[in-house]
Image (cartoon, rainbow, N blue to C red):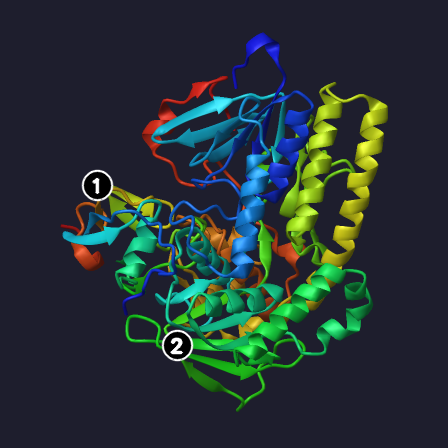
């Protein structure tokens, strides 16, 4: 973080659309910016960079995103913006001290402001066979395809909920994969209840129509009101069974049908990666219209302790346009608070950004209401189904914990070890929450979240022991 | 099941190199992850879960789930989706001191 002449420095955590937008605003106001990302390239999940084979086309959709991502990262002035990829932020401590880890070495830095733009990860669901090789996330397949031009299988079923299913199916087909079907849990009529909102979003509506047409042209069937109930294979995936569901995603008995595929792409929405924000002392609130847990912030993106700001999916699940708007706003507010932007200029620029945020939130509210798994999602679970893949905790063990009075994720973790493994509850938390709700009627607020502790992702103890920088952090 | 890397023209992957998976050579190109190169070689099962012994491979593909962890140059629990393939890397399924396929402590 050291800089010449006492320049004010800002650390942006996450190099996706939100973090990049914040960085552009900050550097253009003369602030020193460091963008940290755990991946080995910037762009996040949305603007994927392309390390390998830059001239290989992945299809029109992904090629357009590549161009946009390259343009946005190209906008950053290397003289003012330090890019630290392959760098994990493993903790955040009082006084906005931030723990970084790269290549065997941990350090603690203390910038003048921190913008958390840590994004979200995809929700997966537990059903018999969900941990088999061949069951992957939609985003994982997209990332592999766009970044490495490698398709993760040959015969695909794409299942879950949301517009991303259609986009991914088209991308897979453009790349030469065989998509046997797209299985959407929401009813076909669900988006129609909100059609007036879509009409205000010409570009989105257009995209949806284009994807629908592309699926149709390729003969890929779209089945709505169905969900995956099991996956099978002798060591690796060979067969997936789906069933019809009602509006709450409760299975209609006798409606099961099976597909022979080697790859099942799942996606049940996103869960914001709030671990660092919570560790920093930010409050989180459950709001289905914001896609679940989000970080409480003011209308200028300030959150928690002084000097901390949030942007992107942490402020509500809403896609790249909303993330970009929140990133811009966070960058402007940081610049104002650090004295790099006078009040009239700020008011003018922020008003524009705030209006983009409002429009983005309005649309996000619709998407988060239409494309959300119903409580029946948990009905595919059998007593033997693992709810925590890392610690291999089966539903029967969680049932016993519930029976013994464990009704929060932290309690279930203490009793069963669910959420205690390498992923530290990232994957199993939404699964456990859905399960608790269905089996015990426990709401998300009551279930709570697993307490975030440093390091948020595993790093070698030896590196932690030799932490250098602004001072050894204490919990 | 062997998965083809996309082969549209112009192909700009450069020259392939090899790294080791369980003691045998696997081909990779610059910029590929260990996960990508293994998938392209038809390898989908990366390890056995320690308690149930069930097979595991790629799940999230973006470094969040830790299902694809392998041992790289003797260091356990490295995410195959986050490690960039490099010539001569020694990648193994089981942690050091454990038999291949997640057997008992060796």
From the viewer's side, name the closer residue of A267 and B104: A267
Q: Residues within 10 Å of mark 2 (few under 14, many from 20)?
A: many
As drawn, which residue projects farthest toward the front?
B10
Q: Mark 2 — residue?
A: A261
Asked whether residue A25 is in view, the answer is yes
Say which of marks 2 and 1 sits in front: 2
A200 left or right, relative to A225? right
Q: Nearer the viewer, residue A140 or A116?
A: A140
Q: Secondary structure at mark 1?
A: loop
**Which residue occupies the foreground of this view, A44 or A376?**
A44
Check the image and report above or below for A107 versus B46: above
Q: Residue at x 61, y 52 (%)?
A: A448
At 38% from the left and 63% from the top, the residue drawn is A152
Q: Are marks 2 and 1 in contact (CB under 8 Å)?
A: no
Q: Which mark is residue B84?
A: none
Q: Residue furthest top?
A: A5
Alpha carbon distance from label 2 to label 1? 35 Å
Q: Which residue is mark 1?
A: B74
At 59% from the left and 61% from the top, the residue drawn is A269
């Amino acid at each position: 973080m050291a800089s010449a002449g006492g320049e004010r420095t800002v650390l942006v955590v996450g190099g996706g659309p939100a973090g990049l937008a914040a960085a552009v605003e900050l550097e253009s106001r003369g602030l020193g910016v460091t963008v940290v990302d755990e991946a080995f390239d910037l762009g996040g999940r949305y603007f994927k960079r392309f390390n390998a084979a830059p001239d290989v086309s992945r299809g029109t959709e992904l090629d357009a995103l590549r161009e946009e991502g390259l343009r946005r990262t190209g906008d950053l002035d290397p003289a003012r913006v330090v890019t630290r990829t392959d760098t994990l932020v493993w903790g955040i401590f009082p006084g906005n001290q931030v723990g970084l880890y790269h290549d065997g070495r941990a350090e603690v830095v203390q910038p003048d402001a921190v913008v958390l733009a840590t994004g979200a990860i995809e929700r997966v669901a537990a059903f018999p066979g969900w941990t088999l090789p061949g069951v992957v996330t939609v985003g994982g397949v997209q990332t592999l395809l766009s970044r490495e031009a490698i398709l993760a299988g040959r015969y695909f079923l794409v299942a879950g909920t949301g517009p991303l299913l259609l986009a991914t199916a088209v991308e897979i087909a453009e790349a030469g994969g065989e998509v046997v079907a797209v299985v959407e849990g929401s009813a076909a009529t669900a988006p129609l209840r909100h059609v007036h909102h879509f009409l205000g979003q010409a570009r989105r509506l257009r995209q949806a129509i284009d994807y629908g047409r592309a699926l149709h042209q390729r003969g890929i069937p779209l089945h709505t009101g169905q969900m995956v109930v099991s996956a099978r294979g002798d060591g690796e995936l060979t067969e997936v069974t789906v069933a019809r569901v009602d509006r709450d995603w409760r299975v209609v008995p006798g409606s099961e049908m099976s597909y022979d595929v080697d790859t099942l792409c799942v996606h049940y929405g996103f869960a914001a990666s709030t671990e660092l924000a919570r560790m920093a002392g930010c409050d989180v609130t459950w709001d289905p219209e914001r896609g679940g847990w989000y970080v409480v912030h003011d209308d200028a993106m300030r959150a928690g302790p002084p000097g901390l700001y949030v942007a992107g999916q942490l402020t509500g699940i809403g896609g790249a346009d909303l993330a970009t708007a929140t990133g811009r706003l966070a960058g402007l507010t940081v610049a104002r608070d650090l004295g790099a932007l006078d009040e009239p200029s700020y008011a003018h620029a922020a008003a524009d950004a705030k209006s983009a945020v409002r429009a983005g939130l309005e649309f996000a509210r619709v998407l988060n209401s239409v494309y959300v798994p119903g409580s029946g999602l948990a009905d595919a679970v059998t007593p033997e189904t693992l709810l925590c893949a890392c610690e291999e905790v089966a539903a029967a063990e969680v049932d016993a914990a519930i029976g013994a009075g464990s009704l929060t994720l932290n309690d279930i973790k203490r009793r069963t070890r669910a959420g205690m493994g390498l992923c530290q509850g990232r994957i199993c938390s939404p699964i456990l929450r859905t399960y608790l709700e269905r089996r015990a009627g426990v709401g998300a607020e009551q279930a709570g979240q697993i307490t975030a502790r440093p390091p948020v992702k595993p790093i070698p103890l030896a590196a932690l022991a030799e932490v250098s920088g602004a001072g050894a952090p204490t919990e | 099941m062997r998965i083809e890397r996309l082969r549209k023209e112009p192909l700009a992957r450069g020259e392939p190199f090899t790294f080791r998976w369980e003691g045998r050579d696997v081909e990779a190109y610059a910029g590929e992850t260990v996960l990508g190169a293994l998938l392209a070689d038809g390898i989908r099962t990366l390890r056995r879960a320690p308690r149930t012994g069930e097979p595991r491979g790629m799940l999230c593909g973006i470094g969040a789930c830790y299902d694809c962890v392998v041992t790289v140059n003797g260091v356990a629990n490295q995410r195959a989706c986050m490690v960039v393939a490099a010539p001569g890397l020694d990648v193994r399924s089981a942690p050091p001191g454990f038999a291949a396929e997640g057997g008992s402590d060796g």
